[in-house]
Image (tube, rainbow, N blue to C red):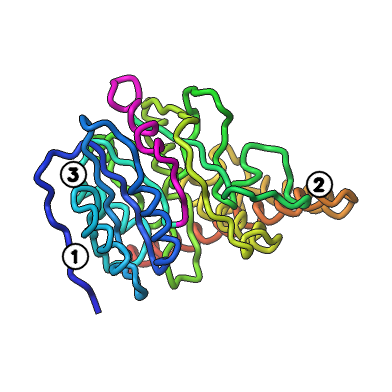
Amino acid sequence: MSQPPATPQLSSAINVTVILCTHNRCESLAQALESLAASTLPNSIAWEVLVVDNNSTDKTREVTERYCDSHPNHFRYLYEPRLGKSNALNSGIASANGNILAFTDDDVVVEPTWLLNLTAPLQADAWVGCGGRTLPERGFSPPRWIPRRGLYALAPLAVFDRGTTPRELRESPFGNNMAYKKSLFEKYGGFRLDLGPRAGSSEAQKSEDSEFGNRILAAGERLLYEPSAVLYHAVPQSRVQQAYFLSWWFDKARADVRGFGTEPAAKWVVRGIPVVLFRRFAVWLLRWTLEFEASARFECKLKVWGLAGQIVGCYRLFIEASTKRAHDARS
């Protein structure tokens, strides 16, 4: 049964809107909202947190409305019945009062200065977007089997850490800690509906955030990495498992094919799959078989799972395109 949105309009002009999409995580949501309520911003900046309830069946609305009641100038609730995070994100963008939009998740704890530090650079013309520093929850120590090499070693745990020095971003920030000028969505469109997590679907998708970031980077827009915009992402034990890392990289690779396409320079293609992917798969499979050191061996295994995701993603795009051509030919 759908629930009507409770969206009281605020009397003051809003400069910044935090869009937080959630589905059936009322307990972690309460912790996230508590940290957001402690945000410290100057009186010259009006701000709001817009909680977009993506068809939750738990106490998400009750939790949110407690903050709407206790902080009426800073919290709003919006119900989005269409399942899918991209649906929720786009609804939040359409309903936001801010001209700067910050995005985060329902399983984080933000520093009191997070919102100010993430959005302050966007008051100027030099930057259209900003990504902050996402760290694992306090006290977390990665197990030895997690590979340490590479920028994305802890990506399955939603960690985005590019050091302590601000610099221009040449990659998309992670969706749990990013901000954009609202005008960008009017210029380039919203988040793609065929990407993004969807509750109840066996076809896990990702990459709605990275696709948008790379879309605007390709258009020549400039993004900033601001390490002082710090938040901490929950690390449940269910994610600190090799099976989770393997599944995450398989799904991520498959979603990236949908978001960014296949190898553009591939010379040989079989059923939509670039032959070079089979060659890479065989190489990493062999390395996985021959490697003895545990962390390096698991890193090779992750490569195999990622390449398998790419292969599956390419094949599914091929099937979809073939089905569409057949349907168009009959029409």
Q: Which mark is residue 296?
A: 2
Counting residues from the N terminus, which is met first, the one under dot 1 or under dot 2? 1
Residue 69: where, in percent of width, then height?
21, 59
Q: Position of residue 261 (x, y in %)?
A: 49, 46
Q: Which residue is mark 3?
A: 97
Q: Nearer the viewer, residue 36 or 329?
A: 36
Q: Secondary structure at mark 2?
A: helix
Q: Looking at the image, which residue is at 25% across and 38% down?
A: 16
Q: Residue furthest bottom?
A: 1
Q: Which residue is mark 1?
A: 5
For discs 1 and 2, the disc positioned in front in the rendered view: 1
Q: Secondary structure at mark 1?
A: loop
Which residue type carries mark 1?
Answer: Pro
Count of residue discs: 3
- Left or right position of 31 against 294: left
**Split into 4 quadrants, where in the image is the C terminus?**
bottom left
Mark 3 and mark 2 lie on one chain; the one further toward the N terminus is 3
User: What element does badge 3 sit on?
Assistant: loop
Whether residue 100 sits left or right of residue 274 in the image: it is left
Residue 186 or residue 142, whichever sits in front: 142
